[in-house]
Amino acid sequence: MTCRRRHAAPLLHGPLRVALAGLAALPGLASRLGLGARLGRAAQLGLGARLGRVAQLGLGALLLSVLLGPTPGATAMAPAPGAAVLSGAAPVAPPAGTLAPGAAPVAPGAVTVSPVATPSVPGAVTVAPQAATLGPATGVRAIAVADQDPAMFTDPAWLALGIAEARVVAPWSLAGGARDQRAARWLDAARRAGVDALVSWQPAGGRLPSGPAFAAAFRAFRRRWPAVHEFATWNEPNIPGLRTAAHPGLLVGYWRTMRRVCPACTVLAPELIDFPDAPAWARRFEAAARAHGIAWGLHDYQDVNHFRPLARTVTARLLRAVTGPVWLTETGGLVAFRNFPYDEARADRATVRTLAVAARGGRRIPRVYLYNWQARPGARWDSGLLGPGGRPRPAYWTLAGALGRTAAARAAVAGR
């Protein structure tokens, strides 16, 4: 377990990289100046604030692609129990998971990037709460968290961030007799905390539910949690080996049912893993649904943890394949997992890359859910913003900086 680096992470791995954006237009200049390897020294010199205006000119994501090039020796990831699958392997139980510049006026509730000095990190470029917008005047609160533990909602480190949305994965029959009621406790805690929930459905047994069974369960859910109005049709159906991977049309009925039962709800199409076939899968689903402009969910773990070039991510390909918005409903940096040895700094860089991918999508990516809040002791999959003991990791401070809540987060963590 490494020691926390006293709140420097938001500047060193998030806002500073955005602030140095203008260097991306001159390939190789960053390396010739030594900035790629010495961002910590640049932070000490106060370059973050001086170059904040450059970041506003729209070059931030480009520099990220220079500074965060492909990870040497990266290999394809495989699934782990209790985690989202990252490569074409056998299915496993899924986990429970904006910075585009622009000077246009912002709609109520939206926030734009601006240089703001915090007491703890002079010259840091932060983003005011609630969350950064992904495109000019989108009016959305974009950065959220995906997690399965209801204890998150009472953690002072969470409360300090002022996040208004969170995501949970639940069995489709949660309100209709499902044995696993952990998501119910999470939803009740979210309601008490005043947090808007995005609910993504997963199997409650071996088989897909019939149309009438799913409709009855969804109506029961709406009666029990009427304030929940955001849903994803299914969690990670494109895992190789699942029936849904070969037959996207099997899930169209659930999508239609939720839209019919709750016309005022936001209903995403299934949430896909960023396998290479995800864009084609999405097109087949839309063809079966005879609908276009559908909102999608995507889990882009491979894009961001393998530092794929921004123009060649599966996220970018999906945005070209469909015309609707794409929510990044699970994403973030891996601290440890199989061939990824424990490395909090690498996970933080992947979190920065997540924001760069979202920025490149602009208003087409209206929300980002970082997975997950706190690591579990002994778990093979570790992408927690907090360590198992509750210590904030560098990615937490990057998130706090992106939300403009570094000072509040520091006070909350110190007062625990």
Image (tube, rainbow, N blue to C red):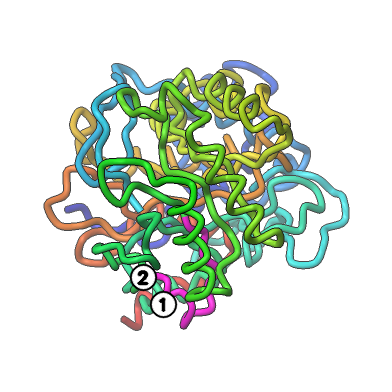
64, 162: nearer the viewer: 162
Q: Which residue is located at x 63 percent, y 43 percent? A: 19
- Secondary structure beneath dot 2 equals helix
Q: Say which amino acid is labelled 1.
A: Asp
Looking at the image, residue 110 sits to the left or right of residue 208; the answer is right
Image coordinates of residue 339 in percent, x first then y, are 20, 28
193, 133: nearer the viewer: 193
| Residue range highlighted in magenta | 186-199
Image coordinates of residue 351 in percent, x first then y, are 45, 43
Looking at the image, residue 280 sits to the left or right of residue 393; the answer is right
Looking at the image, residue 137 sits to the left or right of residue 6; the answer is right
Q: Which residue is mark 2?
A: 184
Looking at the image, residue 384 sits to the left or right of residue 310; the answer is left
Q: Which residue is located at x 36 percent, y 76 percent? A: 155
In reply to whether residue 190 is colored magenta, the answer given is yes
Q: Say which amino acid is labelled 2.
A: Ala
Q: Which residue is mark 1?
A: 188
The answer to which quarter of the image holds residue 320 is top right
Give the number of the disc on residue 344. Answer: none
The answer to which quarter of the image holds residue 63 is top right
Q: CA distance from mark 2 to mark 1?
A: 6 Å
Image coordinates of residue 212 in percent, x first then y, are 48, 52
- Are there few (<14), some (14-19), or many (20+) residues within 10 Å of tag 2? some
Look at the picture and state if 211 lies above or below 69: below
- For the C terminus, the quadrant is bottom left
Look at the picture and state if 354 lies above or below 229: above
187, 20: nearer the viewer: 187
- Secondary structure beneath dot 1 equals helix
